[in-house]
Image: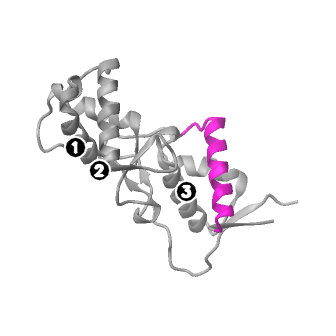
Amino acid sequence: NPDPVVRPVTKHPSRTYGPGSPYRRFRPSRGGNRDFLLKDSYRLMLARDIAAIVNTEGPLHKDVLLERLKELHEVERAGSNIEGNFRSALQHALQGKMVDRRSEEDFIWPVDRNLFSFSSFRTPGDGVVRTLELIPREEIELAVLFLVEDQFGMIREYVPQAVARPFGIERLAASGADRIRDIVDGLVEKGLLRVSG
């Protein structure tokens, strides 16, 4: 019995999914202000910073977003005060439709972007290598679709390791492999991949 193979749904020679493109970090046009993170009276300014970072780097995990804010405002550690101000500003940005939250609670998106407004998933770049937990489901879907299309099909059990590689992940944990398998199952259910064998 040969191993099941996942195949692209389309048969035409032109490419549907692009290869990965390097990650791009937010570059602020001005210096930071520690008070934005330290004082709750700066919630609106912090919400604007959140939107600026997310519009460049989004979708991104909220933990990465907090790290970017700390870098921007030159704050070393995030105590409970800073975390509270961050949560409050993030809530303000979400309610004001400056940013968006999708299927996975922990990821913050630009308001006008979805899976198919990406031209590709993001590979390591600009000093950023993400663990699998910090990569949104939709981006992993694009990597799966690209690799399966690129290879004209792939043995299903090899997909997790093959997908981890372009993200710069050399050792894939069992939980990470399970997450990628779930994503492949979802793509089959959506009709974006088919299984043969």
Secondary-structure class at tag 3: helix
As drawn, which residue projects farthest toward the left?
Answer: 30
Q: Residue 152: x percent and y percent?
A: 63, 69
Q: Which residue range is magenta in the image? A: 170-191
Verify CB contact (< 8 Å) between mark 2 and mark 1.
yes
Secondary-structure class at tag 2: loop
Residue behind mark 3: 141
Secondary-structure class at tag 1: helix
Q: Earlier in the sequence, mark 3 or mark 2?
A: 2
Q: Amino acid at mark 3?
A: Glu
Tag count: 3
Q: Is residue 13 left or right of residue 23?
A: right
Label 1: few (<14), some (14–19) or many (≥20) C-alpha neighbours in 10 Å: some
Q: Residue 5: x percent and y percent?
A: 73, 62
Name the main secondary structure of what is drawn in magenta: helix
Q: Is residue 156 left or right of residue 163?
A: right
Residue behind mark 2: 98
Give the spatial CA distance, label 2 vs label 1.
Answer: 8 Å
Label 3: few (<14), some (14–19) or many (≥20) C-alpha neighbours in 10 Å: some
In the depicted view, which residue is nearer to us: 27 or 65? Answer: 65
Mark whose residue sits in front, 3 or 2: 2
Magenta-drawn stretch contains 43: no
Residue at (64%, 36%) from the top-left corner? 175
Q: Amino acid at mark 1?
A: Arg
Residue behind mark 1: 48
Residue at (72%, 51%) from the top-left corner? 157
**Dividing the picture into quarters, in which one does residue 113 lie?**
bottom left
